[in-house]
Image (spheres, rainbow, N blue to C red):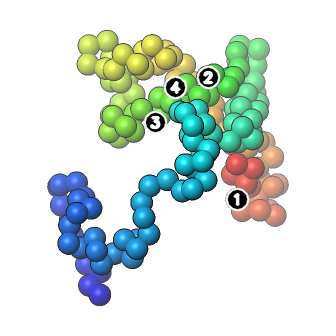
Amino acid sequence: MNRQLTWSSLPYSSSSSSSSSSPSSSSPGGPTAHAAAHARDIESAFRLFVTPAIERVVLDMTNLEGARRYGDAWAGMDETDLRAYTGLLILAGAYKSRGEAAASLWDAESGRAVFCATMPLKLFHLFSRMLRFDDRATRAERRVADKLAAVCRV
């Protein structure tokens, strides 16, 4: 079987003749049975990826980092903030904004209104700097026993 890479400026077409020889063509595409049974709306579909337990870890560790860096000035991130932040990241990907400066997404003339309506750019940047999955202060000692200590809880 020839495993040569072929580069193209056109998007991949699943109807091409080469798709019939790929190993993944034997399995059907689409959602798994579990996803189909549990994704009833946007939120439940999102929960298949980001569970409440993961959300709690991210919120706890992000707020810990924010309190360390900003003290009483840190207002904290709550569930709504985290979901809004994550939603904006997903939207940026859906808009194919890779490599685009975040400021351009919030630009009054050329940006997209949903970004400004969701949160100010400064708050988005602040959340980007503070977002954590673990306690940075204890990571080194936990890494001795577990190389994936930074992400093991999520």
The mark nearer the N terminus, 3 or 4, is 3
Of residue 15 and residue 151, the one placed in the foreground of this image is 15
Q: Is residue 21 left or right of residue 63?
A: left
Asked if the residue at tag 1 contacts the one at tag 2, i.e. Cβ–Cβ closer than 8 Å, the answer is no
Q: Which residue is mark 4?
A: 125
The mark nearer the N terminus, 2 or 1, is 2
Asked if the residue at tag 4 contacts the one at tag 3, i.e. Cβ–Cβ closer than 8 Å, the answer is no
Mark 2 or 1, which is nearer the eye?
2
Q: Which quarter of the rendered picture does the N terminus lie within?
A: bottom left
How many C-alpha atoms fall within 10 Å of the one at disc 3: few (<14), some, or many (≥20)?
A: few
Q: Which residue is mark 1?
A: 148
Q: Which residue is mark 3?
A: 90
Q: Is residue 8 left or right of residue 47?
A: left
- Three-letter residue code for mark 1: Leu
How many C-alpha atoms fall within 10 Å of the one at disc 2: few (<14), some, or many (≥20)?
A: some
Q: Position of residue 112 (x, y in %)?
A: 33, 20
Q: Residue at x 70, y 15 (%)?
A: 75
The mark nearer the N terminus, 4 or 1, is 4
Q: Position of residue 21 (x, y in %)?
A: 30, 78
Quadrant hosting residue 132? top right
The mark nearer the N terminus, 3 or 1, is 3
Q: Secondary structure at mark 4?
A: helix
The mark nearer the N terminus, 2 or 3, is 2
The mark nearer the N terminus, 2 or 4, is 2
Q: Which residue is mark 2?
A: 81
The alpha-carbon separation of the residues under discs 3 and 1 comes to 25 Å
Q: Is residue 82 above or below residue 141?
A: above
